[in-house]
Image (spheres, rainbow, N blue to C red):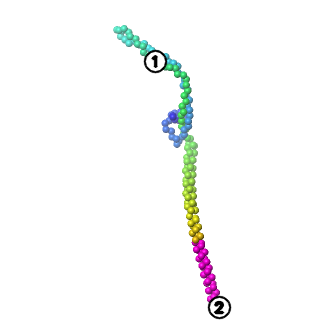
Amino acid sequence: MRILDESGREIKDPDLEAGYLTYKTITTEHPAVPEVKAEYKTIQLDKTGKNDVLLERVKVRDWQAPVPAYTTKELVEVYHAYTPEELAEQERQKVEAEESAKRAEEEAAEAAAQAEILATLPGAVDELAALTAENTENIELQAGAIEELSVLVAAKEENNG
């Protein structure tokens, strides 16, 4: 398939980064061609005059059959160059897409980090419960020791007093 620029000139390798292609049908009207009859010319072979003159009939033009008028249609691609404004818009969209992809990647990494932290929470809660139980036991022991000391101090004060 042929590729034409907007002015109708044929191009071989369009830059699709700087433009785009569309399809177009080109209609060409061909006029009728009349019949052409064969044409002959008689020529003299011996021009010296010494011998009898020989004549030869030579074809000058061949017969051509008549051709009726006809129409042809050709599908072509037409290359349209982007305007500076379109190129600037494409660049802006490209930058936005890259930034969006980067943000999505960062958000995915942050979500993975949060999921990792959440995965450790049950173990941390169990550890905290064990420490709390241990501290409760220690506090109970300390309360019992304080109570014993209070009894001893009260008994000593009675003896001293």
**Mark 2 crowd level (few <14, some 14–19, many ≥20, 10 Å Cα):** few
Between residues 75 and 7, which one lies in front from this camera angle? 75
As shown in the figure, which amino acid type bears the numbered disc 2? Gly
Residue wearing tag 1: 61
Residue wearing tag 2: 161
- Do the residues bearing badges 2 and 1 touch, measured as CB atoms within 8 Å? no
Residue at coordinates 42% horizontally, 13% vertically from top-left?
57
Q: Position of residue 138 (x, y in %)?
A: 59, 77
As shown in the figure, which amino acid type bears the numbered disc 1? Arg
The quadrant of the picture occupied by the C terminus is bottom right
Residue at coordinates 57% horizontally, 69% vertically from top-left?
127
**SS under mark 1:** strand
Residue at coordinates 55% horizontally, 30% vertically from top-left?
73
Is 151 within the magenta? yes
**SS under mark 2:** loop
Magenta stretch? Answer: 131-157
Q: Position of residue 24 (x, y in %)?
A: 56, 34
Residue 137 numbered tag:
none
